[in-house]
Image: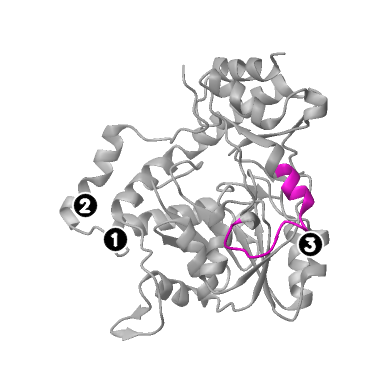
Amino acid sequence: MKINVTRSSMPSYEEYCEEIKSIWDTVHLTNMGPLHNRLLGQVQEFLQVKNVEFFVNGHLALYCAIKAMGLHGEIITTPFTFASTTNAIVQAGCTPVFCDIKEDYTIDEDKIERLITAKTVAILGVHVYGNICNVEKIQEIADRHHIKVLYDAAHAFGVEYKGKGIGTFGDASMFSFHATKVFHTIEGGCITFGDESLRKNLTLQRNFGVDGEELDCFGSNAKMNEFQAAMGICNLRHIEDEIASRGEAFARYERNLSGVEGLTLLPIREGVQQNYAYFPVLIDKEKFGIDRDELCVRLAEKEIFARKYFYPLVSENKEFTEDKTVGTPFAKYCSRNIVCLPMFAHLASEDVDRICREILRK
């Protein structure tokens, strides 16, 4: 049987239909309707954050956050991320400056400071595969240089660090609610933030820059609709089961693949409550016998579809007129040697075992 790299979690048909019934009563389809506002409060509580605003997707959420914060200049970030992170920086009129990553695949905080210049306005860290950045060290660097801190937390919904929601760190964090994520609203996303004064600019950016009858600034159209919110309300009811089920698959992978020469599994940082969003494996061809690409072909022949995530690096975008990978050798190495194995809620134990047997077959 075919096993895809991911599968969207969905409530029952009846549960979703029950939730959307009210839309026919209110005839409120978008523009911060009652379902949107209800879910907003629930997500704020679940993420343990002071403030949150919803958007139609995570990409526009991040873009709007950069614009709302009035950032103009260089933003230090990681090339080991999905294209959206860099795209948002560039589309918002800023310049990405790429910092290498470390063994947990997050930005190497020890290499950030050497990249700071008079043009630097922010650090944008990416929490990768549910692993979190060194939030304390990054904040300390930012405070010393009087720059902002943002996080792309697309992979980190429900992750906690030392008992605190990961969205409480930095000036703002973006969470993706895409259909492939641990929690989704079909498409969607949010910005969490500490400073209440940022809310007005976020809502302006989300709604064309319109404030009442005034055109206050140039904005976008990034509002979450009621059907998205209804899906989110349903899925949030089941989030604990979602994460627990992923955790079972994660643990089974670890039991099957731990200690295998040539395979490096995801290191988990102390103090982090994981959401088990992904199961990446870094492959050393010399020790394991075949490389990442050969393994992907082997799995695909058995109807098992893994993902080369992230490949290529976003710094390899053809729009860049110079080689942006020079200063990020470890990120480049990981991009060419890492694979994410199938991971989703209720992935059957026998399917995990089957995947692992194919990986270890000599």
Q: Which residue is mark 3?
A: 137
Label 3 environment density (alpha carbons within 10 Å; few <14, some 14–19, many ≥20) = few
Numbered mark located on residue 23 in the image: 2
Q: Relative to 184, is 127 on the left or the right?
A: right
Query: Could you say which is closer to the camera, residue 194 or residue 299?
Result: 299
Q: Earlier in the sequence, mark 2 or mark 1?
A: 2
Q: Measured from the top left, where is residue 62 in percent x and y?
A: 52, 63
Alpha carbon of mark 3 to alpha carbon of mark 2: how far? 46 Å
Q: Amino acid at mark 3?
A: Lys
Mark 3 to mark 1 CA distance (whole Å): 39 Å
User: Nearer the N terminus, badge 3 or badge 2?
Assistant: 2
Stretch in magenta: 317-334
Residue placed at 49% from the left, 57% from the top?
Answer: 44
> Which residue is identified by label 1?
33
Residue 313 vertical position relative to residue 110 in the rendered view, above or below = above
Front residue of this view, candidates 333 and 238: 333
- 6 left or right, relative to 330: left
Image quarter in which the C terminus is found:
top right
Asked if labels 1 and 2 touch by Cβ distance under 8 angstroms, the answer is yes
Residue at x-position 35% and y-position 45%: 231
Eye-nearest disc, 3 or 2: 3
Along the horizontal axis of the image, is 12 left or right of 120? left
Up/down of 115 relative to 259, above or below = below
Q: Are marks 3 and 2 in contact (CB under 8 Å)?
A: no
Hey, what amino acid is under mark 1?
Gly
| Res. 258 in view | yes
